[in-house]
Image (tube, coloured by chain):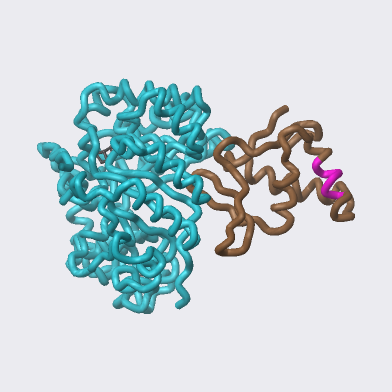
Amino acid sequence: MIAPDAVPYLPRGVRLHRDHVRDRWVLLAPERTISLDMIGHAIITELDGSSGFAQIVDRLAAKYDAPADQIAGDVQQFLGQLAERRFLEVRA
Amino acid sequence: MKVPAPLAMLAELTHRCPLSCPYCSNPVELAARSGELTTEEWISTFKQAADLGVLQLHLSGGEPATRRDLTELVKGARDAGLYTNLITSGIGLTEKRMHELDAAGLDHIQLSLQGTDAEMADRIGGYRGGYERKMQVAGWIKDIGFPLTLNAVLHRQNLHQLPRALEMAVEMGARRIEVAIVQFYGWAMLNRNVLMPTREQAKEAERIVARAREDLKGTLVIDFVPADYHSDYPKRCMGGWGTTGLNIAPDGQVLPCHAAQTIKHLKFENVRDKPLADIWYQSDAFNTYRGTDFLPEPCQSCDRKKIDFGGCRCQALAVAGDASATDPVCVKSPFNDKMRALAEDFSADEAAEITYRTAAG
Ligand code: SF4
Ligand code: SF4
């Protein structure tokens, strides 16, 4: 679980990339390419290296006009999967 | 079948290498330095690859660091928009060069491991002092902060070192380790008597990997290439022939997989003569084994054919004598008994001696 004030960020070697040939956003990582849907892309672009988890959730909730606790669950799951595969780091 | 655009490209910048591993994936007939693509030719190929849809570029060899223009090539690849991964033994990299690669935008390094101590590593690599140098390079990688994958190549001689290799990956700060049991083509085929793991070793490796995946969850990602001579079903080779990736040989020949040149009746096109896109979509070498139409029985009526595409073409040729046959690793292949017998025989050959790969001219 990522704590509310912990800061999730993409480590070196994982970056967002516009795949023009396939008209989509992807995360490029060592030996892996992760295709991002609209929501995944929205979450990734909120990772600025200084915002805490709760802040990110609030911004997304405002942007998509959705309840924060529902967004929190989705973001937690999405980022948790990236962290498990070492595509995401979390600073306490 | 609509042909998808490729996602990954492996650029074998050179066949030259200071090491001489007996399982080297380079062909037994090595390309000479004089025939290698120039800096400009490589960079043009990278741009064409990016336009074609390639996202990930692997710079490999031989030892890519033997190319003096390596930094320039990395920069060219990044400018083309490619994620750039360097596959190296570490030999030939200095601290200064690593900082230059960093500045050029290198995304990731994959460091090969021939053994977990100098005695084993230098014997397998055939290069004294290689291990010590590699450890030094690993230190620089960590200091600079390059993301690292450790690539442990295992076989009968060093499989017992797997637990230590996993520890070393964690110590080096690697996020990922590739545990690859030697696949048998080219040089490895010549050395199968020395390298073939026993069935017991292969099973033990699977157990160790399964346990380590639990213990190191979130710390180290483990990718495992099991011993395919001891498996029941073949692996999906290259994600499927002509669907996902392509290789460029040092002289510019475009190959569907790194061992494809063992299939003598295929004719390979060259980036010096034709646009890469034409080669990918139209050449016979890519089209011959695309999809599943070429497969014979038992594959045609098998429900796994969309999963493994009948396995590896090069292995089919090597053991069944026909590149379009069912991969003999498969329990349904008529050559499976032969395959198993071969595996047992080779793994029991205690007296076998190493044939090192020779130098590229
Ligand atoms: S496998 Fe060994 S000999 Fe072949 S290129 Fe790699 S380091 Fe060199
Ligand atoms: S019969 Fe062919 S398709 Fe079926 S599992 Fe074996 S190799 Fe794969």
Relative to A15, does residue A64 appear above or below in the rendering? below
Residue B120 in which image quadrant: top left
Asked whether, in this view, residue B85 is left or right of residue B354, the answer is right
Name the residue rendered at 37%, 58% in the picture: B246
Is residue B65 within the magenta segment? no
Give whichever of A31, A23 is nearer the camera: A23
Which quadrant is home to the N terminus of chain B? bottom left
Name the residue rendered at 34%, 44% in the picture: B60
Q: Colour of chain A?
A: brown
Q: Colour of chain B?
A: cyan
Residue interval drawn in magenta: A56-61
Asked whether, in this view, residue B1 is left or right of residue B88, the answer is right
Give whichever of A22, B190 is nearer the camera: A22
Relative to B260, does residue B14 appear above or below in the rendering? above
* Image position, residue A15 (x, y; %): 60, 44
* Image position, residue B173 (x, y; %): 50, 28
